[in-house]
Image (tube, coloured by chain):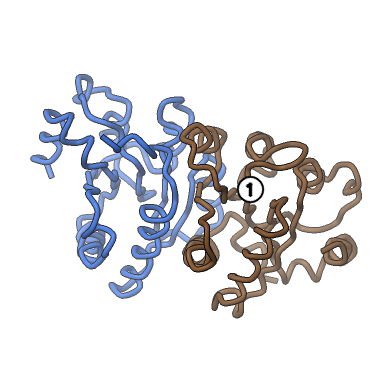
Chain colours: A blue, B brown
Amino acid sequence: MESYTKKLLTSHLDDLAHPVIMIIEDSDEDFYTFTRVTQNLDILKRSLYKFLRFKDGDESLDYLLREGDYQSLNAPLPVAILLDLNLPGTDGRDIIKRVKQTSHLQMIPIIVLSTSSSQHDIQTCYGYGANCYMLKPMGVLEMQKTVQILFEHWFQFAILPSYGQFIV
Amino acid sequence: MESYTKKLLTSHLDDLAHPVIMIIEDSDEDFYTFTRVTQNLDILKRSLYKFLRFKDGDESLDYLLREGDYQSLNAPLPVAILLDLNLPGTDGRDIIKRVKQTSHLQMIPIIVLSTSSSQHDIQTCYGYGANCYMLKPMGVLEMQKTVQILFEHWFQFAILPSYGQFIV
């Protein structure tokens, strides 16, 4: 993953042809399951979407806000963010709040993918402006179906705010 | 549709068992196509969701804000809003802005379903806080697929902010 981040750091034009979906997920196991189930998705096979994964809330915000190690980053913003809630450093709830309060970031759709079915968490996320909240299911088959619906909906049928940005 | 609105006006407990999806659509033809394609959806056959349609932006806001003719309305808020953009009276863009700036309404997911592929419209809607923007396709088969993905995603897999409200 480090090598892909470096590629983003140095190759601006290349990235324009490869819209990035930012995945903020601290669990290696959950990220592995996620990438495994996405390998069966037709939409990804046919598309140019790339994943960029962060494990840590603070680093994710640095990347989005071009702060810290990313101050001189010359790469487009992600077209969407898939977000786990409980993270080291700044947690997912605070990431939603910060992104949605930042004028040049607030349009990026944030799709929460969490194991928490707490009504408080769900309401907090929507209240902060998350675009959608989905439960991370147990089991690979259930995860496969959830991720398939999520991808078909957001990356095949929905029109993202970045619409037009990648027609180069 | 009037009779269903009246039912909502008088039957609070009944509505708790029948979560309402608000459809704001001025075109009778588009609403007819929409209801026709939803009749084939498994999720609706198995669920208790009810549609409540408004043709006019001002009346939609009155209903949501319990103003005008709806001042004494005793009915739960919709679990989601499917919104056309160009409407008589207050238009769809202003409805998004008003709903997302009203603290007790802002969590209701707004899914825009529009024929406009204007980047300005798309960015305006997301900027005002719309949860999702989808293109209203021409043709019944394409509409069928779009509505199917939309319903599977939002009403079968996503967890809505009203989660728990209808477990009575």
Name the side, left or right, on which B164 lies relative to B75: left
Q: Residue at x 76, y 51 (%)?
A: B55
Q: Image point 28% across, 28% down: which residue? A: A62
Say if A134 sits above or below B16 in the image: above
Residue B71 falls left or right of residue A23: right
Instruction: Work out which residue is located at the far front of the displayed protein and give it.
Output: B139
Res. A53 image quadrant: top left
Instruction: Describe residue B61's horizontal placement relative to residue A59 as left or right.
Output: right
Image quarter for residue A46? bottom left
Residue at 55% from the left image edge and 47% from the top image edge: B115
**What type is the residue that disc 1 sits on?**
Asp
Q: Which residue is mark 1?
A: B84
Please tell me whether mark 1 sits on a helix, a strand or a loop: loop
Q: Is residue B142 left or right of residue B102?
A: left
Judging depth in this view, the residue of B113 and B5 nearest the camera is B113
Q: Nearer the viewer, residue B74 or A149?
A: A149
Can residue A93 be seen here? The reply is yes
Q: Which is nearer the eye, B168 or A13? A: A13
The residue carrying pointer 1 sits among few (fewer than 14), some (14 to 19) or many (20 or more) residues within 10 Å by Cα, namely: many
From the top left corner, tell me how far across and down residue B41 is, in percent. Answer: 55, 75
Quarter of the N terminus of chain A within the rendering = top left
- The quadrant of the image that shows the C terminus of chain A is top left
Please report the residue visible at 62 percent of the width from the left and 64 percent of the height from the top. B34
